[in-house]
Amino acid sequence: MTTGAAPSGNTSACLVALADAPEDDWLERGRSLVLRGELSDALFIFEAAASRFPSSSDVRLGWAGLLWQAGSPTRAEQILREWLQTKPWDAGASFLLATLLRDQGRLQAASQTLLALFEYGHHDVNTVIRAIEMLDDYGRPNEALTICENAIRTAMDDPRLHAYAGMLGIQLGQFERTRAHYDRALAQVPDAVDWNIPLGLAGLQRYTDPRHPDIAFFQELLRRPGTLDATRCTVLFALGKVYDDLGDFAVASTYLRQANAMAHASSHWSRKAWKRNIEARLAAPVSSMMLPPAQDWTPVFVVGVPRSGTTLLAQQLARYPGVKNRGELGWLSFWEQRISSRPSSRRELEDAAKAYAQQLRQDDGEAHWYIDKQPLNLLHVDLAMALWPNARFIHCERDPRDTALSLWSQSFHDSAHDYAYDFSNIVTVIRDCRRLAAHWRKRYATAFLSVSYEKLAASPDETLDTIAHWLGLQGRQPVSVSPATPEGIATASAWQARQAVYTSSIGRWRHYAPYLPELAAINVR
């Protein structure tokens, strides 16, 4: 049998009793064993059921899922692939296999599994949306957009798909196609404005004409009776961005004040909790356990306060051969919470390092440097260094007034950034991040490098040369990125990061100084 052991006496009797029972009885018995934690006996039931009901999708999926849970992912994958060879249209098997592959960091294989699903038979719009959301969560916007637009082309003209296509198009820099999708969604369902479409439209371009039709549309939404508060808030942020583009900073600041007041009113961010978190990290001793350094690769963490240049720097470094940018991963935070929830051990560190390495290295070709640009990995430097003593941290610093203005101008979907709607909270975060960076720089002097956004923007080649030398990229020259397979940027920098490096954001806060006196008062040094 699969378990490599004999079934218990009760399970042997159960197998005899179930011999002529219907499929539902087998499934119920197997699931009850799982709920009792008797995984080995449950595996006997499911494997026997697979022989008894060879055409049952529920049995096969239950068997594969249980094998995965029991620590046999290779066998689980084999069962699912064999099943899909004869039933390639089985959405449940495809989603389970994709999830299993993602857990192993095999994101390219997971993407191919979901792409293959839609080559066979018809699937309803909810199945399409599930695949799109999974791939977007996996950081695979190209494949997600392919599935989305293929569904639209095959007469699935659903406004939700157009909204998703628009969102994905922004990540991929396909701004003209995005507008067409958003226009179609709005034409079909006026309530599509509640799907963050105003913010999406505002992010497609730099506005130069005060008569642009988007402006009238946004202002009409504010006047429209029944507009949801959440939608009104996003429209106010969109109008703030429009008038910033137009250089009318007085009007922009008015809209942004209203937007931030609304967002702050529903924020649950706690300054006290943040301060306790920072003080605990500053007081924590160096980890008593450290794993051996990775032998043939280097994890690189680009950190700092959000909107301080982390996306720009990661994009530029990814142009070097042997460097892969994985975007903003959440695995350091995940593993810190998991490890700290119970006494830590070397085995736990090894499990975390292995699982996280799979998400960094993935299955799209070997590299030597892998970038995780989640800015607030700055909080988790001790853990990263315990996992990989050869890790490197590049800390982005920017004029705090420009950083504060940039944060305050954004509508964030992640509640972790709810501090951004209040200047005093923003200052607290910037100040504490600088304290923490100074602490890490002292503790891990050879692994921690600070980079000025202003120097990167003004002298990108010189700054990148310095960083490349520090990382050990000598002899490698950056190359142009192929537009054929654009990299997704799922942050507020989706538009900016696709432009040539520019200096116009340096000192931008001065435009707002007459209208936002809070900016001039910021001093975090």
Image (tube, grey):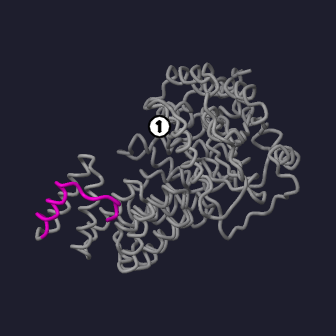
The three-letter amino acid code for the residue at tag 1 is Arg
Question: x, y percentage for residue 369?
Answer: 72, 52
For the point 57% across and 53% down, which residue is it? 359
**Snapshot quadrant of residue 366:** bottom right
Q: Is residue 246 visible?
A: no
**Snapshot quadrant of residue 222:** top left
Q: Is residue 431 visible?
A: yes
Residue tagged 1: 338
- In this rendered view, identify the residue nearer to me: 439 or 391: 391
For the point 57% across and 36% down, which residue is it? 256
Q: Is residue 402 left or right of residue 141?
A: right
Q: Does residue 233 sit above or below 43 in this rendering?
A: above
Question: x, y percentage for residue 347?
Answer: 52, 40
Q: Does 15 lie within the magenta span?
A: yes
Q: Is residue 151 left or right of residue 492?
A: left
For the point 66% across and 40% down, which residue is it? 307
- In this rendered view, identify the residue nearer to me: 281 or 159: 281
Indicate the quadrant containing the C terminus: top left, top right, bottom left or bottom right.
top right
Question: x, y percentage for residue 396?
Answer: 73, 37
Q: Using a 10 Å C-alpha cutoff, classify the residue at mark 1 as few (fewer than 14 neighbours), some (14 to 19) or many (20 or more).
A: few
Residues drawn in magenta:
1-19
Question: x, y percentage for residue 110?
Answer: 49, 65
> How many marks do you count on the picture?
1
**Snapshot quadrant of residue 83:** bottom left
As helix, strand or loop, the secondary structure at mark 1 comes to helix
Q: Does 142 lie within the magenta span?
A: no
- In this rendered view, identify the residue nearer to me: 371 or 509: 371
